[in-house]
Amino acid sequence: MLRDRNETSHVYDEEKARSIYENIVGYFPEMKRTFMLLKERYLLEVIEMDKFMKRAVELAVANVRDGGQPFGAVLVKDNNAIAEGVNELHETYDVSGHAELLAIRRAQKELQTNDLSGYTMYASGEPCPMCLTAMYFAGIEKVLYCASLEDAVEVGLGKAKLIYEDMQKPKSERALSMIQMPLNEGQENPMKLWEERK
Ligand SMILES: [Zn+2]
C-alpha cells in the first residue's frame, strides 16, 4: 500500500516491524495495547492532533450518540474545512454512505469538479478500501486518520480490514468471485467505441 512518509526520515520496514510485534504480542497478550501505542509513536511518527482531526473525532462521537457508527471526516484545502461527513448507514440504505465518501461527494457537488488534488482528508477512522479508492479517483494525495483499522476490529468493526486482506489475495482466492464474460462475436464493443470516439 502506498503511504505518505514525507514527514519521516528513517527507513521503516513494515513487514519486519509487524512480525516482531506479532511475536511479542503472541507471548504477552496483555501488553498488546502498550505495544500498539509504541508502534504508533515510534515507528509511524505520530502527528499531533489538530483542529481538523478534533472536528472529525467530534463528528464521530456525535454520530454514535445519534445511533450511527464512530466515523467522521473533514476534507481540507489550504487550511480550510471544505466539506464534512459522517457514516450514515444507520439512516440510509446505501453502503457508500461512509464519512469520507460523503465529504468527497459534497465537495465535488459544491465545486462542480471531480478533481480534488491538493485536498487532505481527515478521517476519525482509517479509511476503508472503498473510501480510499474514491480518494485515489478524486486525486486526493494525503489522508490523516485517528483510529486504526485494528482499533475498529477491537470494537467489532472489522469489515474494512477483512476487505483489505482479501484484496491482497490473487483474484481466484478472494471471497468475492470475479469471472470474466467475453463479448459475443458481432456484439458492439463499448471499449472500441470509446477508443474510436471523436
Ligand atoms: Zn469507507
Image (cartoon, rainbow, N blue to C red):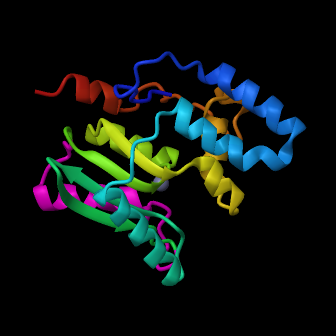
Given residues 169 and 44, the one toward you in this image is: 44
- As drawn, 66 above or below 130: below
The image quadrant of residue 164 is top right
Q: Find the magenta span and give its range.
A: 90-116
Q: Residue at x 37, y 43 (%)?
A: 143
Q: Is residue 99 left or right of residue 38?
A: left
Q: Is residue 123 left or right of residue 137?
A: right
Q: Decide whether residue 86 is among the magenta residues.
A: no
- As drawn, 182 above or below 47: above
Residue 61 locus on image (x, y percent): 47, 73
Q: Residue at x 68, y 54 (%)?
A: 153
Examine the rendering and report whether any part of residue 178 can be seen. Answer: no
Given residues 194 and 171, the one toward you in this image is: 171
Q: Decide whether residue 111 is among the magenta residues.
A: yes
- As drawn, 189 above or below 131: above
The quadrant the C terminus occupies is top left
Q: Residue at x 41, y 54 (%)?
A: 123
Given residues 23 and 152, the one toward you in this image is: 23
Residue 46 locus on image (x, y percent): 46, 40
